[in-house]
Image (tube, rainbow, N blue to C red):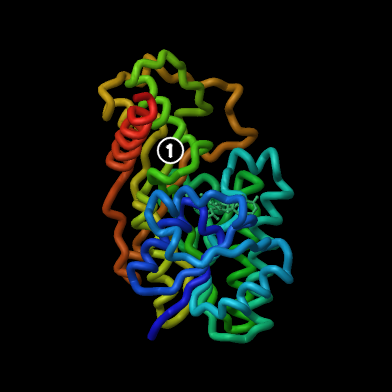
Amino acid sequence: MHKTALIFGISGQDGAYLAQLLIKKGYTVHGTSRDAEINNFSSLIALGIKDEIFLHSVSLTDFRSTLQIIEKVAPHEIYNLAGQSSVGLSFEQPVETLESIATATINILESMRFLGNDFHFYNASSSECFGDTGNSPANEDTPFNPKSPYGVAKASAYWQVANYRESYGLFACSGILFNHESYLRPQRFVTQKICKAAASIALGSNELLNLGDTTIKRDWGWAPEFVQAMWKMLQQKDPEDFVISTGILSGLDEFINCAFSALDLNWKEHVISNPKFFRPSEIKSGYGSPKKANNLLDWYAKKSMPEVAKLMALKQFEVLKKVSK
Ligand code: NAP
């Protein structure tokens, strides 16, 4: 059967990789941005797929706008990858963060309920819902204890999805994804900041990279692999939530070391941890168990942190070198 997918937030890192995957699988892909007229869709252009996608302007905090696009496209699968996605920024924009995540999700669920079609819906949840996982990896039964406005908003959206699934029998599920990175990660995220600084120093800059707390630990994977898990979740017979992660915990200082070492640099000469950039509340340690996804989705993370950091640093070097010529 020929399938149509609607991706909210197609201009982002995951939206672009998911669109690429679905096009390869033969889907007709529609995607939304808050303003498709002014967005340059650089990630879709970088992947060479912009012209193969139907693009629309949609505000997910506006019920009419949400309902209209779902009715018009009549997709088999709906992926919500839109919303304010920075934990750091969520402390500065708590209301925008909550509305762009929680109000948006309820608008999609209500639209699905109202239209009544047999949509399959994927909600982009986050490991930030768990807060600190300590010394054991979080799984689908681990209680939530979010530590940021972003985590609180994601937890709210997660429960909305679970509630609509149970109350109205919708095919709706959440992927609780741990950090995943790529060349398309926006510059404001710490991993991309590190790789860009390493590349620019390797090309002769004498800048000093100021970061927040470099002792934090995370579970970092590769975004193009993580979007495959999203698709697999919507091909299941029944909707279920899944933790998607590599299962490996690494320090931010180890990420920095891998990125700088890939360019033959000693990070300790170029990076400082500056308390000015510490967050009001920080997760010390966060990692997840991908066992359920391994067993039921046959999904495995192939790339882990050292390779991810190296690939991103080398790419930044290649890009900056071209620009500086
Ligand atoms: P991303 O690159 O930041 O893309 C998110 C998209 O959402 C943006 O391209 C933007 O599209 C839209 N957006 C940004 N701010 C918004 C706002 N205030 N209101 C409404 N829309 C806004 O994020 P991503 O890395 O692809 O992540 C996709 C989803 O997965 C997000 O919901 C994110 O929170 C979640 N997630 C990501 C990770 C990760 O490690 N990457 C981990 C767990 C969960 P337009 O500007 O075109 O409207």
Q: Is residue 142 above or below residue 320?
A: below
Q: Is residue 302 left or right of residue 92?
A: left
Q: Is residue 30 visible?
A: yes
Q: Position of residue 189 (x, y in %)?
A: 50, 38
Quadrant of the drawing holding the N terminus: bottom left
Residue under the image location 44 percent in, 48 percent down? 179
Q: Position of residue 266 (x, y in %)?
A: 31, 19
- Identified by mark 1, the residue type is Lys
- The answer to which of 175 and 314 lies nearer the viewer is 314
| Label 1: which secondary element | strand
Residue under the image location 57 percent in, 44 percent down? 86
Q: Residues within 10 Å of mark 1 (few under 14, many from 20)?
A: many
Quadrant of the drawing holding the C terminus: top left
Question: How many marks are shown on the rendered structure?
Answer: 1
Q: Position of residue 136 (x, y in %)?
A: 41, 49
Q: Is residue 292 visible?
A: no
Circle 1 is placed at which residue position? 217
Q: Is residue 147 left or right of residue 230?
A: right
Residue under the image location 32 percent in, 42 percent down? 308
Q: Position of residue 17 (x, y in %)?
A: 40, 57
Q: Is residue 136 above or below residue 197?
A: below
- The answer to which of 309 and 291 lies nearer the viewer is 309
Residue under the image location 46 percent in, 51 percent down? 13
**Within the image, what quadrant is residue 100 found in?**
bottom right
The residue at label 1 has a CB less than 8 Å from ligand 1? no
